[in-house]
Image (spheres, rainbow, N blue to C red):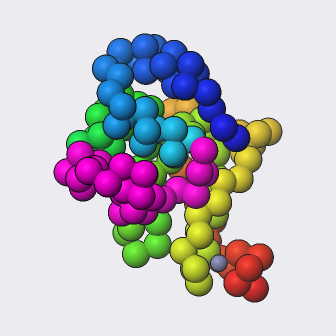
Amino acid sequence: MPKSVNTIIERFNEKNIRLTPQRICVYQFLLENRIHPTVDTVYTHLKKSNPSLSKTTIYNTIDALSSAGLIRTIIANEGEARLDAYTDFHGHFFCEKCGLVTDFCLDGCSFPDQIDGFEMKTIEVRATGTCPNCR
Ligand SMILES: [Zn+2]
Ligand SMILES: [Zn+2]
């Protein structure tokens, strides 16, 4: 699902985050590649078209996007951090064989907004098993 740069600029403005070419580039990559990549995967892909890109820049950029709430980190099998630019509520399926992380829709499911006595920040739905390719 390609996102126009205008949409990206709007979202950055909504979140009050400064626009830099690196931030736009990383955010666009994550929106267009809904593969929940690791930081390393993002770096490897973007390095091809931006040879001067450093890993530090990528880490700083991802930190800035996360702090602004534009992206989030999900923890995959073996504690690997994977990035998601889709912050709407959805579930994640983790393939135990190839490491694939896929979204699934939770529309129509009901979950509590609060749990008595606790201050809940996030709620997650994770499924594990084998993806169609690995079956
Ligand atoms: Zn798989
Ligand atoms: Zn996701």
Quadrant housing residue 67: top left
Residue drawn 71% across the image and 75% down it: 131
Please, is residue 135 above or below residue 3 in the view? below
Q: Nearer the viewer, residue 133 or 114?
A: 133
Whether residue 64 is visible to the viewer of this picture, yes or no, is yes
Instruction: Pick the quarter of the image with the C terminus.
Output: bottom right
Residue 12 among those drawn in magenta = no
Residue drawn 61% across the image and 39% down it: 89
Please, is residue 100 above or below residue 42 in the view? below
Please, is residue 11 above or below residue 95 in the view? above
Residue 17 left/right relative to 123: left
Residue 88 left/right relative to 79: right
Residue 42 among those drawn in magenta = yes
Q: Furthest-left residue in view? A: 56
User: How many numbered marks have been drawn onto this rendered protein structure?
Assistant: 0
Residue 71: percent from left, percent from top: 44, 39
Range of the magenta residues?
32-58
Residue 77: percent from left, percent from top: 46, 72
Residue 11: percent from left, percent from top: 50, 20
Q: Nearer the viewer, residue 113 or 41?
A: 41
Residue 4 left/right relative to 39: right
Quadrant housing residue 62: top left
Instruction: Pick the quarter of the image with the N terminus.
Output: top right
Whether residue 125 is visible to the viewer of this picture, yes or no, is no
